[in-house]
Amino acid sequence: MYLFSNMLGVFVFDSQFSIVDEMLFKEADEYQNREEFIKKISSRHKNLEEPDEKSIKKILLHFNNPKYFNDFCSKNLKLTKLDVKNSVNRDNLIIQSIKSIGEIDKAINLLVKRLREWYDLYNPEFSRATESHESFVEEILNNEKSELLKKINVDKADSIGAELGQEDIEPIKSLAHQTYDLYQLRKTHLNYISALMDGYCPNIKAVCDVMVAASLIAHAGSLKRLSILPSSTIQILGAEKALFRHMKTGAKPPRHGIIIGHSLIAKAPDRMHGKVARALADKISIAAKIDYFRGKFIGDRLRKELEEKFK
Amino acid sequence: MYLFSNMLGVFVFDSQFSIVDEMLFKEADEYQNREEFIKKISSRHKNLEEPDEKSIKKILLHFNNPKYFNDFCSKNLKLTKLDVKNSVNRDNLIIQSIKSIGEIDKAINLLVKRLREWYDLYNPEFSRATESHESFVEEILNNEKSELLKKINVDKADSIGAELGQEDIEPIKSLAHQTYDLYQLRKTHLNYISALMDGYCPNIKAVCDVMVAASLIAHAGSLKRLSILPSSTIQILGAEKALFRHMKTGAKPPRHGIIIGHSLIAKAPDRMHGKVARALADKISIAAKIDYFRGKFIGDRLRKELEEKFK
């Protein structure tokens, strides 16, 4: 007596390879819980054995029957669809949103450059006095030209900006409005990633900032892959070009990749960058392993240790 | 007696080069209307003559006096500022807005690609069934997943898209919303340019569409420069790279530059492209000259002639 199971059900064959008992799966989840069915059917028969190579060929012949074929096909499709459906996880969501932030940044850059050039026709003094793009956009949306000039102590009569009619200012303001909205969207996305991370990788989030943490996961491909990377790889993740240049030409090896965006490295003096990057990558590697294996939250302690060390 | 005028005023010098009469300018616009002042002062004196090279040197020495210097400086600054201010014209506005449309297109492309990839996790069937980016964005903003699937005759149970919670759909919708707004901004800008052109270059606008007309002006730098270009240059404006490749390597010369965006060329079969482009550039060249010299509106006639010819 042979016990055999496939996508369609659990079967018992006798030594002549004809079916003596069967339990067919009706829903995809029955297939996923097939162990239960196997247990049940096993309890009804004695001397059940796994078919060897020779007998399995005979058993498979049985399923050549066209009456099984359509069933096979549709069940297979259903299961694959289910697998695809269930493969979407938080890694995907984090990766999509951090990449989206990247595109938004590019879009903002394009639009804000054009905005400044266009607005320069009207009020060049203010544009030049305001370095930050974001506050530039906000200010011109909320204030009239005369108020802006007053803020930077320029007499309106002295401005070399042209007098534009309301109908010519309107399209400039619309562009500014759009750019402002993109800045807001960027913030919303960042909050969303932050919320995702709270339940998924709180330790990495605590050690790095959200932007760096998400970029690391996106670059590694998933939290799982990040968790198995050695800390030396994490240190230069994102600096592959510099690494290969180093290996090929003997140029200096990169000291940091994505983690250069971390505030600890930004604050450190240049000669300390390598040291800080090494220690940071170390803690990230620990945090990633804890997060992947659902360990306790010690991210705040890891972060504190780092900050103490490089105070 | 010599008559001399500069930024400061109109002066009459006697033969010993001391001032016998003067009228100083108070405002910048008095300098711009200096002819009137010269007339007035001329009527008060006899035997006035233009200083020759030798005497003008003596006269200029007079203005070496430091009491004039500050006046010179501030007046000069004021006048230059006024010139800069008045140099902003409709060419600038058209160029800024058409370039802005270019940046908006790039931004839309970046965001819509990301949007599709992200949304694919949730509902890949609909994304693949909808080719146009713009209607894709509109549809997913206005309909729920189940409605969209119904539209393309896909059973919800068959979809391989993941079930996402509202909090995971929200950021995708925000991104879609932002992209939708950019499409709207593009339209507003196009209307604005169209309105600008009505009073500035109605003939070019009638012969080309707004996009092509504005791109031509932007590429030439101004309506004035476009109006003095020969039609053969207008034909390949924007295809400089292909032109120089032709001149350097003997590759085929370009048949059209910016004007390839014109509906007449798009509609024509490939072998006719060169012919249509030549005729079109011809009419654009005529239209540009009429517009620059403020001639009558014959744009509709020019366009009609073209359309008749290539019907």
Image (cartoon, coloured by chain):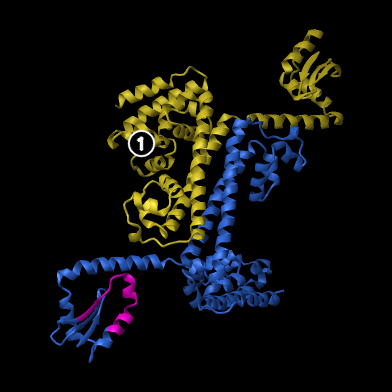
Chain colours: A blue, B yellow
Q: Tell me the quadrant of the picture where the C terminus of chain B can be found.
A: top left
Q: Tell me the quadrant of the picture where the N terminus of chain B can be found.
A: top right
Image location of residue B188, percent across then percent down: 52, 36
Q: Amino acid at mark 1?
A: Arg
Note whether A62 is above or below A94 in the view shown: below
As drawn, is A153 to the left or to the right of A63? right
Q: Is residue B101 visible?
A: no
- Toward the viewer: B68 or B227? B227
Number of marks in the image?
1
Q: Which residues are magenta?
A: A21-40
The subunit letter for the residue under badge 1 reads B
Identify which residue is drawn at 66% across, 51% down. A132
Q: Is residue B51 visible?
A: yes
- Residue farthest to the left? A16
- Label 1 secondary element: loop
Note whether A65 is above or below B230 in the view shown: below
As drawn, is A131 to the left or to the right of B123? right
Magenta stretch encompasses residue A216 = no
Image location of residue A280, percent across then percent down: 61, 74
Image location of residue B143, percent across then percent down: 43, 49
Note whether B69 is above or below A138 in the view shown: above
Kindly identify which residue carries mark 1: B255
As drawn, is B208 to the left or to the right of A178? left
Identify which residue is drawn at 68% across, 67% down. A267
Neighbour class for label 1 at 10 Å: few (<14), some, many (≥20)? some
